[in-house]
């Protein structure tokens, strides 16, 4: 695996994890039956699938990238 591909996989995962966190905060306190709630939950389904696919791609990385993944996740902004 090339360094460039590994970086892309890590970056993709971090991006998807961040989107999932943002959506999680957005749906708190919103009535899931309201128009806004329905949109947020529909978005969440897509966001979750994207995150799950990105997580699965992490399994393809050699073990030496594990520390890098953890560092990237820890640097995600608190929400």
Image (spheres, helix red, strand yellow):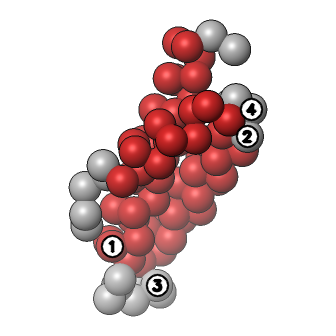
Which residue corresponds to mark 3? 32
Which residue corresponds to mark 4? 60
The image shows residue 36, relative to residue 32, as above or below, that is above
- Indicate which disc, 3 or 2, sits on the residue closer to the N terminus: 3
As rendered, which of 67 and 79 lies closer to the eye?
Answer: 67
Q: CA distance from mark 1 to mark 4?
A: 30 Å
Q: Is residue 35 visible?
A: no
Q: Residue at x 40, y 45 (%)?
A: 71
| Residue 20, image quadrant | bottom left
Q: CA distance from mark 4 to mark 3?
A: 36 Å
Which residue corresponds to mark 1? 25
Q: Is the residue marked by circle 4 packed among few (<14), some (14-19), or many (20+) residues within 10 Å?
A: few
Task: Give percent across and percent down for residue 37.
Answer: 41, 77
Q: Is the residue marked by circle 1 packed among few (<14), some (14-19), or many (20+) residues within 10 Å?
A: few
Assess whether mark 2 and mark 4 are in contact (beta carbons under 8 angstroms): yes
- In this picture, residue 59 sits left or right of residue 51: right
């Amino acid at each position: 695996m090339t360094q460039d591909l590994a970086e892309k996989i890590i970056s993709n995962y971090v991006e998807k994890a961040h989107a999932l966190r943002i959506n999680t905060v957005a749906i708190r306190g919103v009535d899931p039956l309201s128009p806004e709630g329905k949109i947020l939950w529909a978005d969440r389904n897509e966001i979750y699938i994207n995150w799950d696919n990105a997580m699965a791609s992490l399994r393809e990385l050699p073990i030496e990238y594990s520390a890098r993944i953890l560092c990237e996740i820890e640097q995600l902004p608190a929400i």
